[in-house]
Image (cartoon, coloured by chain):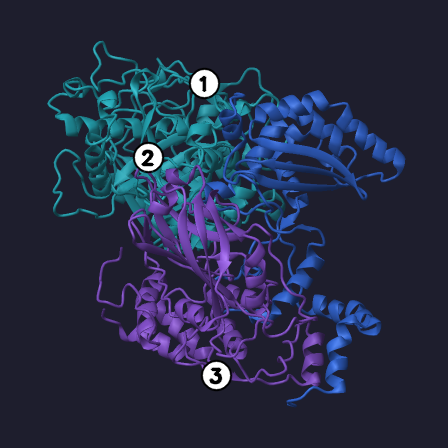
Chain colours: A purple, B blue, C cyan
Amino acid sequence: MHYSDLAKRIVDELLRPDGSDKLRPVHTIGIGATGYFEPSEVAPQYCKADHFITPRTKATLRFSNGSGSKTQHDDWSDVRGMATRFHLSDGTDTDLIMMTLPEFFARTPEEFLEFTLAAKPTEVHWVSPWKKIWQMLHLIPPQPDPYPDEEISPNEGAIKFANENRYSQLAVFQAAAIGAPVSYLRAAYHAVHTFVVTGEDEVERWVRFTWQPIDGVKNENPLDPPGADYLQGRLRDRLADHTSRFTLMMQIGEVGDAFDDSTKPWPPHRQRVMMGTLTLDHAAEDTKAQDDYFEKLSFNPMLLTPGIRASEDPVLHIRKEAYAYSSGKRDATPCPFSGGAEDDQ
Amino acid sequence: MTNKDTWFNRYVNSLPTRGWFKLLSRYVVVPYWIWRDPKPKLPGGPRESPQPSENTQRMMNLIMPLKDPSPMGRAMAAMAIAQNVDEIFSGLDNVGTVHTARFLILGDNLCMISVYDGDFSNYIRDFIETIGSVFDAVISQIKGAEHMIPTCDHVEEFIEWVHDHDLFQAPDFPTDLFALQDAAKGLPTDGPAHEIMTLPRDLILQLHANPNLSLGGGYRSYPGYSAAQVRDKFGVGW
Amino acid sequence: MNKQVKKDVDIDAIERDVQGNILRSYSRHLVRHLMLEVTNVAAARRFLGVAANGGSEAVPAITPGSDWGKAKPPSNFNIGLTFEGLKALGVSRRTLQTFPVEFSQGMTKRAMKIGDFGDSAPDKWPAPFDTPEKVHIVASIHADEEGQLDKVEAQVAKAFTVLGVRDGRGLGRGKVFFGYKDSISQPRFKWVKDRTQATADEPLDPLGTILLGYPTSMEDMSFRVPYPDALGLNGSFNAFRILAQASYDYEIYLDEAADFLLKHKDVDLLLPPGAEKKVGKGLDRHAALREIVAAQMCGRWRNGTPYETSPDTMDPDPDVSPTNFDYSAQSRCPAGAHMRRANPRGGHIVQRIATYTRRLVRRGMSYGPDFDPDDFDRKNPDRRERGLLGNFLCANLGAQFEAVMCDWLNVGLQTPSITGTNDPLLGANTAETSRFDLTLPDNAGTISIYGFPRFVTARGGAYTFLPSLTAIRYLSEL
């Protein structure tokens, strides 16, 4: 596959000094899980893709922390990821990649590169108490103090960028306050981009997907952090004795909605279709073999299957190349697009 | 700039929870900013938008101050509703676009809370047409509304009055507040970006201009469907 | 502001007082709309004073509504004022406050409500509509010869600054772009004689539907008459709209829809084999399906025959009335058809209370280069701008024009089966979300078609007040 300079540049620039080029440049720390997806009774009306018409589809997942640092900081405020691979009945796969942030930072790959450059992690500073008082007198909440061993952070650059670019404000503002979930199984995840689904009647709809945890969304109390390493343990503990389920919700876009701009989430009043339930029953064990298997997986948001296609969202399209390039770079199990396939499906 | 935690830093971090600082904020800092950067009162009700789902199941939170908030006055307001139940129910059936509607006496206000489909002005106009006499009875109990009786001769004025007493609906996405405030000031909504961390202040100041508001458009179990569609689907006629 | 309950009215006096383009259509070949700015108030007032008093050598007379009999003037001249225009002429603040809010805000501020977003948004409108605060008056000249338009324009330009000019014309045989015969059904007003509606059987509309100061079709309800009566009484409001029509794209969509239908499993229900010959002369199956889609989308076949009473053919024998029919639960005319959305007639609608209350008078002429739907080059798209210079007249823009636009043409609240869809011809559609349901005979259900773009785009316009001749004199004497 040919990688554009822009895709390569974005991936290269995302790499943090405290990251590793053997690992993913973002969403670096993660853990695998497996389970199965069961479509709802109405799902086929909206999408004829294999996993929406097959009673049960096996799934492989990876949960992750958004940061590109190779050091685990589960209790830090951060976006989390949930990548799902559905193993379809014909032996092929399709991916659905989501994160806890409901929108993206940039409308185009070019803007995303600008954002990446602007939000390069810089040395963290303690805001002086005098400046904090000044801010409080201006009714501006001071930035929280850095975490005890935090050395670099993208926050300062991201906020500066958002102060100049309206389109990135919602994502930056919400990311700044996103916190840490009590478990990877207790967060809602959003696919952010628009996809086009085709129903059994061949009608196309422009839609967006969300995973909603049936156990409920719950965050840690930031004043009483549970320590840097708890998410993987809690996932294993929970799935050792129980299953955990997510509902797949699909919003249907309407006239005037942003179909190819992932910085603009759709309001919660769009028609919502319950598309199915994902049941997780197994977490990756804490062994090198399991770790190697799951961490070498290469997901790709453009790994689609007939019945679901990408919208024109340019960020979604460059993710295809960026993920494949990144996969090759870190020597992972080749991404389906790394082998030269140019086909979107 | 210091790069380590200090006693002073911890003390400053605790300021927002300290009594003296709360008093300072409440009586000096906030009033100063209200004077320095006043926000226009933002209009009530749902905002115009083209999506069908934004035009169904819209919220009305009409807060009307009672002329006489004593128990006697409250009883008069309660009677104005109770004596007109037939009028209200058959009127709502014939307006055809209302999912739910109810009246509350809350604080010193009579409130009408409803969920309706379609344009706000059409809803109120159709309502006046079918039960204007009830509105007359109701607003005779309301402060500053007598001049609009009978409502059927003051349609335009009454619609504006209701719009003004309908609660502002805060945006579903927080940063949209910037654009709403810009629009209210007649500024372009795609002008230079605001400093993102001034959003909390803008919210505080907006809550001074609109002390009561609806937090977002609210949750809907089956968004995007009209009352008539629901009735049609259940086979109870529309 | 008092309610005018008039059991008997002197209709001749009213017709002499109202402007001539309100109660009846002029049926001229040409129109020229001049967008004017009042830059010299004294000159503007002098002009209006003379114009309202019969005109002079140098100033055209405002055409009143009275029947001109055999003395047909060479041209007709009428004016509408925007809220900014009333201000510019010196109308007092107190008086301005008695105008309705939608008029004082103006069309551009009401854009979202009437579907003017995206490519139709006012910030995309060309001059002079990019500076709505300067558009004070829309003056309209109707004539049959271009020389008359030039003559009147030159006279007007001596008193006002002409910001922009839009010329329109009749396309012949009553047709408009998209190839439909238009302006067949109009409200009929009590007391007003209108030959074009002489045989129509819809209920008479009270004068308050179109003029300020008279009872409306809503029992008990009256609209506020701007103060003083000299200014407000016998006035009317107009939504002046420049609406570009994508004729080429419309015909291409009809091709696509026919292709889609030919492959549809229920196509024989929509058009039984062989029935294409009945649809219209010389049509093959594909062409007949195109015309069925066009007819169901509009509610009339393109030659004007109502789909409701003639669902199988555009040339019924015996002929059917162009105006007399109604809708029911069994109607063949789709609930989503343009004509039925704009005027649901006596058919059942969700807002029962609103039946017959949102009537509009439509007066329009076409602009832009010819386009022949029967003979155009599919390989060389002709997307030059063409469309309609439309006037939508009513006594209350909020209760009539906007009410129709926001709840009926778009959104489709009046019938549950179409709620969530927009008017196929005029609506604010996008290909990603559009849907239209074609009806099948014998209540056999519907076939949905999808993927059509927005065919009509707003390219300018203004809300104007059409003052009576008395009011124009009042304005000239401020």
The mark lying in front, picked from 3 and 1, is: 3
Tell me the residue at 16%/36% (across/down): C372
**Residue named by callout 3:** A18
Instruction: Pinpoint the chain carrying mark 3.
Output: A
Q: Amino acid at mark 3?
A: Asp
**Does residue A229 appear to the left or right of C165 in the view shown?**
right
Q: Amino acid at mark 2?
A: Gly
Q: Mark 2, residues whose alpha carbon is within 10 Å: few (<14), some, or many (≥20)?
A: many
The one of C273 and B123 positioned closer to us in this rendering: C273
Image location (x, y in percent) of residue B229: 49, 30
Residue A161 in the image: above or below residue C429:
below
* Cβ atoms under marks 1 and 2 closer than 8 Å: no
Marks 3 and 1 sit apart, C-alpha to C-alpha, by 73 Å
Tell me the residue at 51%/65% (across/down): A80
Determine whether the residue tagged by mark 1 lies in a helix, strand or loop. loop
Tags 1 and 2 on a common chain: yes
Q: Amino acid at mark 1?
A: Gly
Q: Which mark is residue C364?
A: 2
**Residue named by callout 1:** C346
